[in-house]
Amino acid sequence: MEKQRRSIILAKQSDNQNHVDEINAYYAAVNQQLLAFVEHIKSLSDANIASKLNCRLQAVTDKEALAIKSLIGIDVSGYTHSINGSSVTHIEKRHGVNGAHDNSMAFAEDVARVEFILKNYDSVNALLTEDFRRFPRVWKNSDGTPSQMIKYEKQLNGTYYVVEAIPDTKRKALQIVSVYIKQ
């Protein structure tokens, strides 16, 4: 089904070869470790177990660290991206096959392509406090205050969003809170 979906998306694209190349790179960018993690979390019946599991991803790039520092004032050099089982559960409930909001993340492979978005984002913005109510607030700074959050955007065939919490802690891990696509 994934292959069929890919050919439909590519057939809709313009003659812009760079855009087609970027779509092809997106489809090739499935992180198999993350895919296995997502599928494992989806198979669990106990949300408490899922919340204790974590998948560490790529290191934060210099480009990202500079953008985040200018947006929210936190130096995330040396940090990594990470996703917790609770976030996968949230993504599935809100954006999965039977998502309450949409089903833009019906394919686990789309979640497993999140690193492509993080490496190739078009823009990144700080989320305002009023935006926080839409996302789970499980991440806190070392002083117990809620962590700040940012949102990456990447235009493909629709816009892919990645929302990340930036907890200022010793773990030095940015935490993916949600991912979704809007057409």
Image (tube, rainbow, N blue to C red):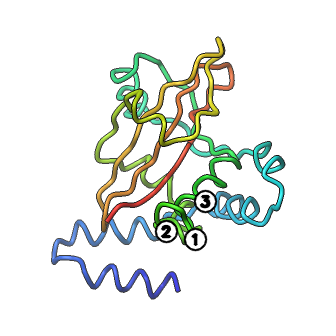
Question: Residue furthest toward the left?
Answer: 15
Which residue is under mark 2? 103
Q: Position of residue 100 (x, y in %)?
A: 53, 62
Assign the C terminus to one quadrant of the image.
Answer: bottom left
- Left or right position of 94 against 36: left
Query: Tag 3 or tag 2, which sits nearer the N-term?
Result: 3
The disc at residue 175 is none
- Asked if labels 3 and 2 touch by Cβ distance under 8 angstroms, the answer is no
Which residue is under mark 1? 98
> Which residue is painted at 45% across and 88% down in the image?
4
> Which residue is painted at 42% across and 52% down in the image?
117
Mark 2 residue type: Asn
- Left or right position of 183 against 27: left
Q: Secondary structure at mark 3?
A: helix
- Asked if labels 2 and 1 touch by Cβ distance under 8 angstroms, the answer is yes
> Which residue is painted at 48% across and 36% down in the image?
133
Q: CA distance from mark 1 to mark 2?
A: 6 Å
Q: Position of residue 57 (x, y in %)?
A: 61, 46
Q: Residues within 10 Å of mark 2 (few under 14, many from 20)?
A: some
> Which residue is painted at 76% across and 44% down in the image?
51
The disc at residue 93 is 3
Mark 3 residue type: Lys
Along the viewing direction, whichever of 181 and 111 lies nearer the viewer = 181
Mark 1 residue type: Asn
Q: Compared with residue 26, is residue 162 higher up or lower down, i.e. above or below?
A: above
Q: Secondary structure at mark 2?
A: loop
Picture mark count? 3
